[in-house]
């Protein structure tokens, strides 16, 4: 019962992260936050399965390093776009420049 509830919570986290990613595509900050939420749910899923099969947790450290690098890159793009254009709306950018 406990494992089924844990899987359900992880699935709901992943589903809501994807729904926010799809529905709130106008702001870059919300898109980045939803991507981090999806990465967090994948991290919980990997941790659950590694603990269930008693594997080594070294792969989780590598996954965390890549997710932190992804978050830092996203924030640097966000800061660059806000300094250049003044906001984080996707409609105000001319992507052909």
Image: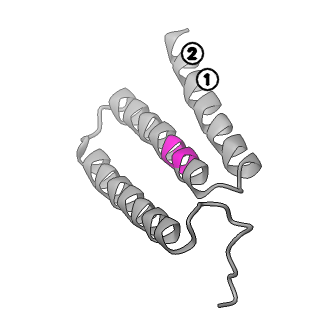
Left or right of residue 29, residue 74 in this image: left
Q: Secondary structure at mark 1?
A: helix
- The prevailing secondary structure element of the residues shown in magenta is helix
User: Which residue is pictured at 54% across the width and 50% down the height?
Assistant: 35
- Mark 2 and 1 residues: CB-CB less than 8 Å, in contact? yes
Towards the viewer: 86 or 97? 86
Query: Please, which residue is most extreme toward the bottom here?
Result: 97
Q: Is residue 28 above or below residue 92?
A: above
Task: Report the magenta residues as a range.
Answer: 33-38
Q: Is residue 92 above or below residue 67?
A: below
Q: Is residue 36 magenta?
A: yes
User: Which residue is pictured at 51% across the width and 75% down the height?
Assistant: 84
Q: Is residue 6 above or below residue 14?
A: above
Q: At which x and y percent is residue 45? A: 47, 36
User: Which residue is pictured at 51% across the width and 65% down the height?
Assistant: 82
Q: Secondary structure at mark 2?
A: helix
Query: Please, which residue is most extreme toward the top here?
Result: 1
Q: Which residue is mark 1?
A: 8
Q: Quadrant of residue 51?
A: top left
């Amino acid at each position: 019962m406990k494992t089924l509830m844990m899987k359900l919570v992880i699935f709901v986290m992943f589903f809501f992260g994807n729904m926010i990613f799809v529905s709130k595509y106008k702001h870059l900050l919300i898109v980045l936050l939803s991507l981090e939420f999806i990465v967090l749910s994948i991290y919980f899923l990997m941790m659950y399965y590694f603990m269930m099969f008693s594997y080594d947790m070294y792969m989780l450290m590598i996954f965390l390093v890549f997710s932190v690098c992804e978050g830092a890159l996203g924030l640097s793009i966000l800061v660059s776009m806000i300094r250049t254009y003044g906001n984080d709306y996707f409609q105000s950018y001319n992507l052909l420049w």
